[in-house]
Image (tube, rainbow, N blue to C red):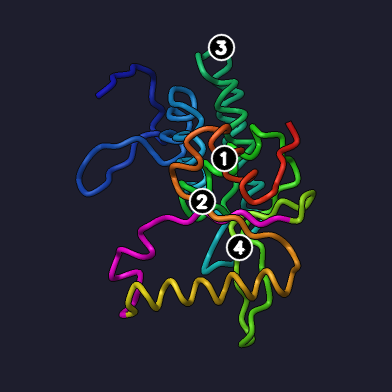
Amino acid sequence: MRRHTGALGAADVVIVDGLLCTSLERTVFDIACTQPREAALSCADAALRRAAVTDRRFDPDAQALWREAMLDRIARAKGRRGVRDAAWIVAFSDGRAELPGESVSRLQLHRLGFRDLDLQVPVKGPHGFDYFVDIGLRDVRTFWEFDGEVKYRDSAMRRGRSVDDVVLDEKRREDWIRGVTQWRLCRGGFADIVSPEALDARLAAFGVRSPR
């Protein structure tokens, strides 16, 4: 537990399940000022997703309004320790990121010099619906997918399918995406995004060189 002191406005305090808490926006701001970028960006992306994404429909205008409000909050806190980091996090945040692993992947890719990043890239599937790929690296024609273990281990996420069926479905999806787009598709888990160097090595194994 770490304790921090600071003034709270009336709008910064909310009640959640009977407990006094800081509002979502204030919480994101405080975390962005005090925590490492990996944690800060994951929180900002998740908060922004609540504001800008509904049933996979992304609203860029809602995202822009959220960022504007957060940057205004940061500007009013000029002089506070960590506000520069908070401004960077808010500017880089993106509500299209679905999981912390995707947020951290994007951060490490940026640290490696990748700039033309697209999130949740739609690829036309074989049965009239789209597949969505986590991150597209347009300059190297490569997709990056964060491959967490929960999709295989969590029975609820498997929705009645066996682990073998999930793996086979993922293989078919991956083959289709490669065939349709003629892009490489690289997968990795938390061990591969623990640092920029780890992700660089993972990408190199697929023949992808980072810009840095």
Number of the front mark, 3 or 1? 1
Residue at screen point 52% across, 69% down: 55
* Contact flag, marks 2 and 4 (Cβ < 8 Å): no
Residue at screen point 59% across, 69% down: 174
Residue tagged by mark 3?
79
Quarter of the image with the N terminus is top left
Instruction: Tell me the quarter of the picture where residue 185 sits.
Output: bottom right
Kindly state the secondary structure of the residue where label 1 is placed. Answer: helix
Label 2 to label 3, Cα distance in Å? Answer: 39 Å
Residue tagged by mark 1?
199
Is 19 a magenta residue? no
Number of the front mark, 3 or 4? 4
Q: Where is residue 72 in the image (x, y as percent from the top left)?
A: 61, 31
Q: Which amino acid does label 3 sit on?
A: Gly
Q: What residue type is labelled 2?
A: Gly
Is residue 93 or residue 206 the one in the foreground? Answer: 206
Residue tagged by mark 4?
133
Q: Residue furthest left?
A: 18
Sequence-earlier tag: 1 or 4 = 4
* Contact flag, marks 1 and 2 (Cβ < 8 Å): yes
Q: Which amino acid does label 1 sit on?
A: Leu
Crowding near the residue tagged with mark 2, few <14, some 14–19, many ≥20 C-alpha atoms within 10 Å: some
Kindly state the secondary structure of the residue where label 3 is placed. Answer: loop
Crowding near the residue tagged with mark 1, few <14, some 14–19, many ≥20 C-alpha atoms within 10 Å: many
Residue at screen point 71% across, 51% down: 137
Q: What residue type is labelled 4?
A: Val
Label 3 to label 4, Cα distance in Å? Answer: 40 Å
Q: For residue 126, which numbered disc appears in the image?
A: none
Kindly state the secondary structure of the residue where label 2 is placed. Answer: strand
Where does the magenta region start and end? Answer: 142-160
Number of the front mark, 1 or 4? 1
Residue tagged by mark 2?
188
